[in-house]
Image (cartoon, grey):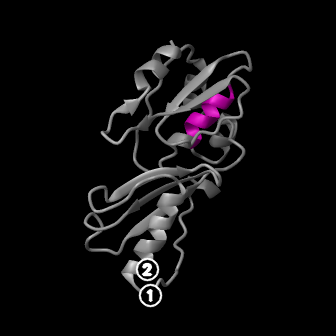
Amino acid sequence: MGSDESEMKRVEVNFGTVENLNDYLRRIVNACGATINKDEAVAVFTDDKNEKRIVMAMAPVAHISPPWAVIRNHKDKAYSLDELIEIGMMNQEIADFLRSLENCNFAISGRGASGKTTSFRALLEENEETMRIMVNEDNAELRLKHPNAVQNIVKRNKKGHVYGLQALTEMGG
């Protein structure tokens, strides 16, 4: 991608034991109001205070490697579509096509670190200030600055039922 958002940096830290690492990871999870344990060994959550998305795994999922965590930082300022062209993330034809779309609902998918959030944020931020934008996310990643953007976080209860997804979606119609 060529941007500072796509750089992966490994942090070399020695916790002494796997249990010390587990304890440290559990503290992060608890501080963010998420859950991780042997029955729910993968956690994906947001640290709202520091505006980071965190993904981590412990045993039994991380059974060959030690427990791990990936912390994703988001830039405060969104790229524009023109800036994405400049850094080689898209070409002019794609940017023009995206700009031509009106009154659309989007579902974005792709592999990790492929530029989904960066591209979508650039597209949404270029909308006219009078346009209403509603985003329903499972983790707060877009963090739009657009004056008419409404961002909702879809949450699950203990039984796995999604709180408000249908209602949130209907409100956007």
The x, y position of residue 118, in whole percent, is 58, 42
Circle 2 — which element?
Answer: helix
The residue carrying mark 2 is 20
Q: Is residue 112 on the magenta stretch?
A: no
In the depicted view, which residue is nearer to us: 19 or 138? 19
Q: Is residue 21 above or below residue 1?
A: below
Circle 1 — which element?
Answer: loop
The residue carrying mark 1 is 16
Query: In screen coordinates, is 14 left or right of 157?
Result: right
In the depicted view, which residue is nearer to us: 19 or 132? 19
Type of the residue with mark 1: Gly
Type of the residue with mark 2: Asn
Q: Residues within 10 Å of mark 2 (few under 14, many from 20)?
A: few
**Residue at image coords 33%, 61%:** 37
Q: Is residue 21 above or below residue 25?
A: below
The x, y position of residue 27, in whole percent, is 50, 66
Q: Dots 2 and 1: beta carbons under 8 Å?
A: yes
Q: Is residue 172 above or below residue 138?
A: above
In the depicted view, which residue is nearer to us: 156 or 85? 156
Q: Is residue 122 on the magenta stretch?
A: yes
Q: Quadrant of residue 41?
A: bottom left
**Residue at image coords 52%, 81%:** 13
Secondary structure mostly seen in the magenta stretch:
helix
